[in-house]
Amino acid sequence: MRVWFITGASRGFGALIAAEALAAGDAVVATARDPKSVTARFGEHPRLLAVTLDVTKEEQARDAAAAAIQRFGRIDILLNNAGYGLLSAVEEASAQEVEHVFGTNVFGLLAVTRAVLPHMRRQRSGHVINISSIGGYSAFAGWGVYGATKFAVEGLTEALAAELAPLGIKATVVEPGFFRTDFLDAQSLSVSKPIADYAETVGATRQLAGDLNHAQPGNPAKLAKAMLALVEAPHPPLRLPLGSDTLARIESKNRGVAEEIATWRQLALSTDGFGTAP
């Protein structure tokens, strides 16, 4: 029996993955700001522990990890899922909006990771899974600040994978595309006050977000099943893109980067060396 520790487990991806894990015979520590929302969704279950956790409060993260160890004795999978979106031009985002989204998506993820890793190091086993986004691999107009939080998650996960490998712990960053969840609803998405000059770019993104809400191509139930396949893999990937839109965007960016490198290669190479002193 594996023991999952899932943040943001009361709805969306977190709740669906928790349900899949329970169905597979695993134990789940399902965290949420209000643990009653977890109990209301899943009911009482012998392999389910609902725990209070606001990821922006590090003491709560430590307490939640301790509760998991007290109940189940170990944590095998940490799924850093809690987060929310900010739809905004970079200039439109206020300092407070930027601080809040980084506080949850980056600093909150770090707080939970710091709380759980000592237990995984003691076990010399575990799997840290961080939910990113296609916006963490390739930037979009209107998603710059949100994407920056996910770019941070990508970099953190790359470093974690290198640091944790000798300790028997794995790390994976998951990059979903547009999935049919409530991510584009007001409860999951903050929208900044618009500036008229960005109507052609960010305004178009706002319109697209409205059109896509609950019409996204990705199936969240299939994503949840994919997460079970991920944790069962003996050699899981560092990156797991999910969705045809994600694959297409990654391939397009990679082609563009390769073309840009070829164009600017000589200038890039010209900055090496110090020459010979006279």
Image (spheres, rainbow, N blue to C red):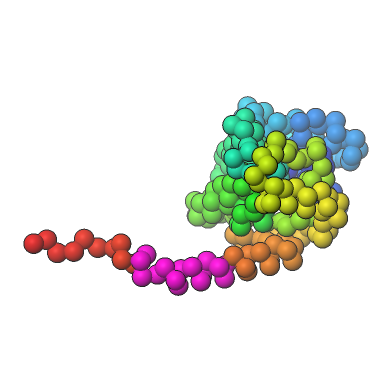
Residue at the front extreme?
197
Query: Across the whole image, how many numbered discs are drawn on residues?
Result: 0
Measured from the top left, where is residue 258 in percent x and y? Answer: 51, 70
Queried whether the magenta region covers residue 261, the answer comes back as: yes
Quarter that holds the C terminus: bottom left
Q: Quadrant of residue 139?
A: bottom right
252 w.r.t. 15: above or below:
below
Q: Nearer the viewer, residue 93 or 158?
A: 93
Residue at 62% across / 68% down in the picture? 252
Q: Residue 198: tell me if it is visible.
A: yes
Q: Nearer the viewer, residue 172 or 74?
A: 172
Residue at 89% across / 39% down in the picture? 41
Q: Which residues are magenta?
A: 254-268
Measured from the top left, where is residue 274 in percent x and y? Answer: 21, 60
User: In the displayed structure, does residue 1 sit left or right of residue 116?
Assistant: right
101 w.r.t. 182: above or below:
above
Measured from the top left, where is residue 132 in percent x and y? Answer: 66, 51
Q: Nearer the viewer, residue 232 or 237?
A: 237
User: In the displayed structure, does residue 196 sit left or right of residue 51?
Assistant: left
Q: Residue 5: tell me if it is visible.
A: no
Name the magenta segment's main secondary structure. Answer: helix
Queried whether the magenta region covers residue 170, the answer comes back as: no
Residue at 66% across / 61% down in the picture? 240
Residue at 54% across / 51% down in the picture? 155
Q: Quadrant of residue 216?
A: bottom right
Q: Quadrant of residue 113?
A: top right
Residue at the left extreme?
278
